[in-house]
Image (spheres, helix red, strand yellow):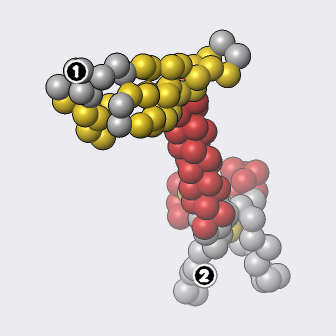
Amino acid sequence: MNTSIDATPLVVHPPGQVTVTPVRDGSREIGAWITGPGGATYRPVIDVARLTGTVVAAASAVAIASAVVVATARRRPAIGQVTMGPGGWVSVKGLPRPSLRPESPRPWWARLLRAHRLAERSR
């Protein structure tokens, strides 16, 4: 008779007596001793709950590490938020004000948004 345990063939001879002795750690089985005419071998038990917990913990660690790498590798924008109003007025947040020049009259909404023209008009 030929039996397979954990993909390792175990030959059991019918005339001899084979004994399986479980090994416990408290109330949990951790393996078994298989004794027979050919000798004794120890077969550990696979703890599926512990293996699943380890896989979930490792996957979580990889996901968190990759999220941190992506977040730190992301480049900050060169300029801030750009909003555009009617008439070609543009407001760029996060930049210093342009240098002083003769102010042309601006609409009230441009002053409210602190918007300035991108290019000077030719006179």
Towards the viewer: 83 or 64? 64
Dot 2, crowdedness within 10 Å: few (<14), some or many (≥20)? few
Instruction: Find disc 2 in the rendering and name its residue.
Output: 120
Q: How many marks?
A: 2
Q: Secondary structure at mark 1?
A: loop
Instruction: Find disc 1 in the rendering and name its residue.
Output: 14
From this viewpoint, which residue is outermost toward the bottom?
A: 123
From this viewpoint, which residue is outermost toward the top?
A: 27
The amino acid type found where label 1 is placed reads Pro
Q: Secondary structure at mark 2?
A: loop
Residue 3 placement, left or right of 83: left
From this viewpoint, which residue is outermost toward the left?
A: 1
Residue 65 picture location, percent across and down: 62, 54
Residue at 75% x, 59% y: name it: 114
Towards the viewer: 73 or 110? 73
Give the quarter of the image for residue 99: bottom right
In the image, residue 79 sits, relative to residue 113, either above or below, namely: below
Residue at 43% x, 28% y: name it: 35
Quadrant holding the N terminus: top left
* Residue 51 visible in this rendered orientation of the protein: yes
Judged by depth in the image, the label closer to the viewer, 2 or 1, is 1
Q: Earlier in the sequence, mark 2 or mark 1?
A: 1
- Disc 2 and disc 1: Cα gap in Å? 101 Å
Residue at 53% x, 19% y: name it: 22
Residue 15 placement, left or right of 95: left
Residue 67 picture location, percent across and down: 59, 52
Dot 1, crowdedness within 10 Å: few (<14), some or many (≥20)? few
